[in-house]
Image (tube, rainbow, N blue to C red):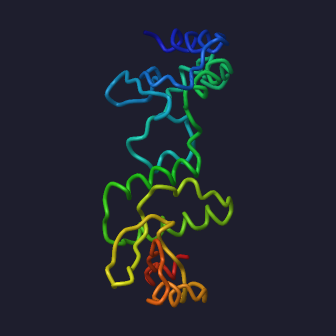
Amino acid sequence: MEDDWLRRFYALLNDDENNDWGNLKFPIVRINSVDGIKHVSGDSAYFESSIQENFENISIVKREVYTKDKANKNLDENAVSFLKSIGVKEFDERASIKIKLDQYDNKKNEHTNSYLMDIASFVSYWKRTSDIDVFENHVFLKGKSKEGTIKWLLAHEIFLDTPYSNTGLRSFFNDSSIELEKYKCELLDEYQHVI
């Protein structure tokens, strides 16, 4: 199946207004692959971007399936619209952070310089955008429990106090006279140079 045929097929599917393509989880998106022709579902693919070069194993949609000319500059808006409708996203800073967070979910390495640089970029992104949803359900921070145990945690399981900010939360969470439904852990001091 040629790339141009697939582009026209995407455009044709986009013209069908009676279908909700958002639920399509079929591997229909052609991506760039060193292994030859490969297809993935839309929700795991990205449009080409200048920041993707720093990442391995990401599914980038082959430009020829959504462009009309040999120079790959003239976009086929119908093909692009269909690809977006099935979940293909722009590879932007948020996507970059999501991939990094997924990697930290899967391997709990000790803090390295690259890890601390990632944390600094996460904080910078959050300060600029206030987007907290990207961090939801990702275990990527280390905290200390009331008993002194160090463990990997979700962001909402952590509290901040000195040396970050004098919030008084350490005293609150360590006060044994206060009965809490859920205890939060203290963010480790080792992040103080990047936050």
Q: Left or right: 132 with respect to 142?
A: right
- The answer to which of 138 and 32 lies nearer the viewer is 138
Q: Nearer the viewer, residue 146 or 5?
A: 146
Residue occupying the point 47% across, 81% down: 179
Q: Is the C terminus in the top left, top right, bottom left or bottom right quadrant? A: bottom right
Horizontally, is 149 left or right of 184 in the view? Answer: left
Compared to 160, does 135 lie above or below? Answer: above
Q: Position of residue 69 (x, y in %)?
A: 62, 17
Please report the residue visible at 43 percent of the width from the left and 69 percent of the height from the top: 141
Image spot of residue 192 (x, y percent): 51, 82
**Which residue is drawn at the image coordinates 55% and 85% (left, top)?**
169
145 in relation to 138, above or below: below
How many numbered marks does the figure carry? 0
Q: Nearer the viewer, residue 44 or 34?
A: 44
User: Which quarter shows the N terminus?
Assistant: top left
Residue 24 is situated, as x and y percent measured from the top left of the image, at 50, 22
> Residue 74 appears at what percent x and percent y?
67, 22
Image: 99 above or below 17: below
In this picture, is 38 found above or below 194? above
Q: Residue at x 37, y 24 (%)?
A: 38
